[in-house]
Image (cartoon, rainbow, N blue to C red):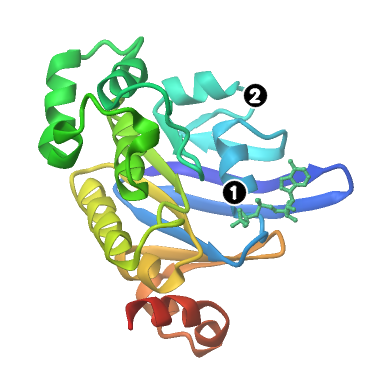
Amino acid sequence: MRMLEVQDLNVRYGVVRAVLDASLHVDEGELVVVVGANGAGKSSLLRAVVGLNKHRGQIEFGGRQITGLRAEQRVKRGLTLVPEGRHIFGRMSVLENLQVAHWGATTNLAAEIAGVFERFPRLEERKHQTAATLSGGEQQMLALSRALIRHPRLLMLDEPSMGLAPKIVAQMFEIIEEINAAGTSVLLIEQNARMALSIAHRGYLMETGTLSGGGDARVMLEDERLHEAYFGKSAEAED
Ligand SMILES: Nc1ncnc2c1ncn2[C@@H]1O[C@H](COP(=O)(O)OP(=O)(O)OP(=O)(O)O)[C@@H](O)[C@H]1O
């Protein structure tokens, strides 16, 4: 079943056309990645899908049009974005961040928090620590947990590897793969193209606002044309 279907999406900021007629889809259970350079329009695409950017085009989620819905209505339907820069509440503790993320949900808070701590024991050790004092990797775990505590149907992640050490990046990708294997559909946006494609089912390439590809991620990994432009940096990081 189609989880997300985006057709002819356009985002512009004044005269800057950040996303040009972009079409993509994510099927239920899929892990799909959009790779591309800095400024290619990847964040603008995700922000439009969740309703944070003005946009033109069609967006269907779970078989229903969501194009006219506001961001909070889209989130209620199960669409969640973990934005670049993480967006956690720095002055609140880990526990408080999780409590706030759960507001309005009908599930049992204690059970949900226990679930988070089972997945991320590191967060339990630091549950009373102020979020701003966590390491980059721990902050990313907290941001992910804040999204997962609401059991999204589609988890969208904007550059989860940003600013993290290579070892932590590898852990983060493992966690994303696990979340997807446990049944959550994932749309991931990454500059770390090699690693992202190595965990994805399918991949798209974004270049100056234009989206292409959409095929098997393993085939993209072997595509010579992508090697020089997009895999160099991640190859260095692995050395
Ligand atoms: N609020 C804004 N106002 C004006 N221009 C913007 C705004 N946000 C983004 N842009 C421009 O739109 C283009 C796409 O930016 P976007 O952040 O979507 O790219 P990206 O692929 O996510 O890049 P990065 O990985 O650097 O975040 C860029 O040229 C950027 O300068």
Q: Is residue 236 left or right of residue 209?
A: left
Disc 1 residue crowd, few under 14, some 14–19, many 20+, Cα 10 Å: many
The C terminus sits in image quarter: bottom left
Q: Residue 46, located in which quarter of the rendered image?
A: top right
Q: Is residue 67 left or right of residue 19?
A: left
Tell me which amino acid carries mark 1.
Answer: Ser
User: Up-down: is 136 above or below 223?
Assistant: above
Residue 201 lies, in percent from the top left, at 34, 63
Q: Is residue 45 left or right of residue 27?
A: right
Instruction: Tell me the element at label 1.
Output: helix
Residue farthest bottom in this picture: 224
Residue 151 lies, in percent from the top left, at 28, 29
Disc 2 residue crowd, few under 14, some 14–19, many 20+, Cα 10 Å: few
Residue name at image x 30 percent, y 64 percent: 199
Q: Which one is earlier in the sequence, the residue at label 1 or at label 2?
A: 1
Residue 223 lies, in percent from the top left, at 47, 85
